[in-house]
Amino acid sequence: RMMSAAEVTALSYQRGERSASSEPVAVSLARLQTDAWRRFAAQRGPLTGAFAEQLLRIGLAEEVNGQVQPRRAAVLLFADAPGSLLAAFDARADIRVMVYDGKHAVAGSTANLRKPAKTIRGPLVDQIDAAVRLVLDELAQGLTLSSSGFRTVHAYPARVVKEAIVNASIHRDYRLNRDIFVRIFDDRIEV
């Protein structure tokens, strides 16, 4: 059967032919010259030329109608508030952490949230680190003695929590107008 243009586009995203993170977005390059960019540039080594040339050279921008536009990945990695900038394109990029009492979420006026939900914003690497710290703090079960002093004991291994949050952040569809949700229940974590 003949596919519509929307079906062809959706299929190209599903099969990995296209990625939302590689698409250019009309965001001012000045909004990407942040501390996150400076940390990246310092770790990467010396970059020469103007900021736009640097982004073009490393594949985080492209020329559109004679103007350099950052790719969505550059906005996610370097903007101070990528979720707010991408909201103009009907997309979201924040992480929300919710802690529930019990084993199921109860919707309605008497929700069973143990505390108000927290929204984590910022460059993607900083978001991931902050979300992992927040979740591990919620899962702390006490202290134990280790060779270098005391360390916190968690209900789940820290590397497992970090991997789940990193995978959700990297593999999500940034075309969607949805945040990443981390739900902590009495018997499990849902990412």
Image (spheres, grey):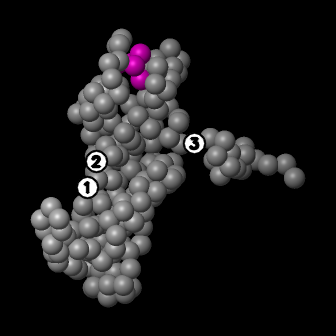
Along the line of sight, the residue nearer the viewer: 71 or 91? 71
Secondary element at image label 3? loop
Secondary element at image label 1? helix
Instruction: Check disc 2 and report the residue beneath it.
Output: 126
Residue at image point 45% right, 42% down: 89
Q: Residue type at mark 1? A: Ala
Instruction: Check disc 1 and report the residue beneath it.
Output: 130
**Between marks 3 and 1, how big is the CA–CA gap?**
26 Å
Where does the magenta region start and end?
51-55
Task: Single out the residue that lies furthest toward the left.
Answer: 149
Along the line of sight, the residue nearer the viewer: 23 or 157? 157
Task: Single out the residue that lies furthest toward the front.
Answer: 147
Along the line of sight, the residue nearer the viewer: 91 or 141? 141
The answer to whether 116 appears left or right of 50 in the picture is: left
Q: Are marks 1 and 2 in contact (CB under 8 Å)?
A: yes
Q: Which mark is residue 12?
A: none
Q: Are marks 3 and 2 in contact (CB under 8 Å)?
A: no
Q: Residue type at mark 2? A: Asp
**Between marks 1 and 2, how big is the CA–CA gap?**
6 Å
Instruction: Check disc 3 and report the residue beneath it.
Output: 19
Instruction: Say if the magenta span includes residue 52.
Output: yes
